[in-house]
Image (spheres, rainbow, N blue to C red):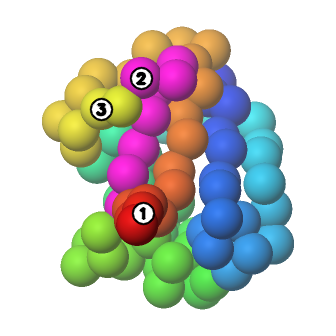
Amino acid sequence: MKLELRFFASLREALGVSQETVTIPDNVKTIADLRAHLIERGNPWAEVLAAGKLLRCALNQHMVNANTSLQDGAEVAFFPPVTGG
């Protein structure tokens, strides 16, 4: 399955990439699986996407949770929580 990944704000800065197209293995089926798969790349991925870090995620520009199923050709965006005031 191919996905278009996008990274925003501090994630983009820490990873040094704003977007990339990836082909993921068949066992990666959810957002949580994708995050774990990216963590396996090692640092800085492991540090930026670590399980304890609060991140927001969107699938095809709709906010989703970690259990959301991935779809071939989808856009997956990761970004830190946003605060306002």
Q: Are marks 3 and 2 in contact (CB under 8 Å)?
A: yes
Residue 85 is situated, as x and y percent measured from the top left of the image, at 40, 66
* Residue 41 in view of the camera: yes
Q: Secondary structure at mark 3?
A: loop
Residue 74 is situated, as x and y percent measured from the top left of the image, at 56, 19
* Residue 28 in view of the camera: no
Rendered view: 64 above or below 32:
above
What kind of residue is marked 1? Gly
Rendered view: 81 above or below 70:
below
Specify the farthest residue to the top. Answer: 72
What kind of residue is marked 3? Val
Q: Which numbered marker is on residue 62?
A: 2
* Label 3: how many Cα within 10 Å (few below 14, some 14–19, many 20+): some
Q: Which numbered marker is on residue 4?
A: none
Separation of residues labelled 3 and 1 (CA atoms): 21 Å
Q: Secondary structure at mark 2?
A: strand
Q: Residue at x 32, y 76 (%)?
A: 53
Q: Which numbered marker is on residue 84?
A: 1
Q: Are marks 3 and 1 in contact (CB under 8 Å)?
A: no
Find disc 3 in the rendering and name its residue: 64
The magenta span reads: 55-62
Residue 67 is situated, as x and y percent measured from the top left of the image, at 18, 36
